[in-house]
Image (cartoon, rainbow, N blue to C red):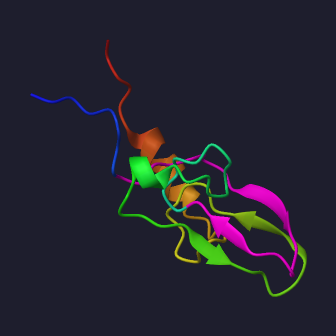
Amino acid sequence: GKYCLQSTERVVAARLPYRVKLSAEKRYAWCACGHSKKQPFCDGAHKVKAPSISPLRFSPDKTKTAMLCACKETKNVPYCDGSHFKEVQKSQLMPPKIP
């Protein structure tokens, strides 16, 4: 059979949000798939790794420092809503892998 390394699913880019300075006059593309190497912003990686997912384009209402979601589970995209705490708890509940 054919073996494929590319994932078509969203991945967790990081466990904690990215603290970034956003400018009101600028337009941003927040990475929604988690595959971008320029987190938390899109670098086009979704085109190959997650073609069904598109970045979120947004302009902040004012210049500010914001916490942008890195776990990709937020309900308040692109801003962190604390969903990463659930991811961390889940990983702590998982039994350790036995070699």
Q: Is residue 8 above or below residue 69?
A: above
Count every numbered label the image shows and give the total. Answer: 0
Q: What residue is rendered at 37% in x and 38% in y?
A: 94
Q: Is residue 56 above or below residue 20?
A: below
The quadrant the C terminus occupies is top left
The quadrant the N terminus occupies is top left
Q: Residue furthest bottom?
A: 61
Rendering quarter of residue 56: bottom right
Rendering quarter of residue 60: bottom right
Q: Position of residue 38 (x, y in %)?
A: 68, 47
Assess whether residue 26 is covered by the magenta stretch: yes
Q: Position of residue 3 (x, y in %)?
A: 21, 29
- Tell whether 18 sits left or right of 45: right
Report the predominant secondary structure element of the magenta stretch.
loop
Magenta-tinted stretch: 9-31
Q: Is residue 82 above or below residue 58?
A: above
* Residue in the foreground of this view, choosing between 35 and 83: 35
- Tell whether 89 sits left or right of 21: left
Q: What residue is rendered at 73% in x and 55% in y?
A: 18
Q: Residue furthest left?
A: 1
Q: Residue furthest top?
A: 99
Assess whether residue 66 is covered by the magenta stretch: no
Q: What residue is rendered at 74% in x and 81% in y?
A: 59
* Residue in the foreground of this view, choosing between 35 and 12: 35
- Tell whether 32 sits left or right of 3: right
Q: Position of residue 98 (x, y in %)?
A: 31, 17
Q: Position of residue 35 (x, y in %)?
A: 51, 47
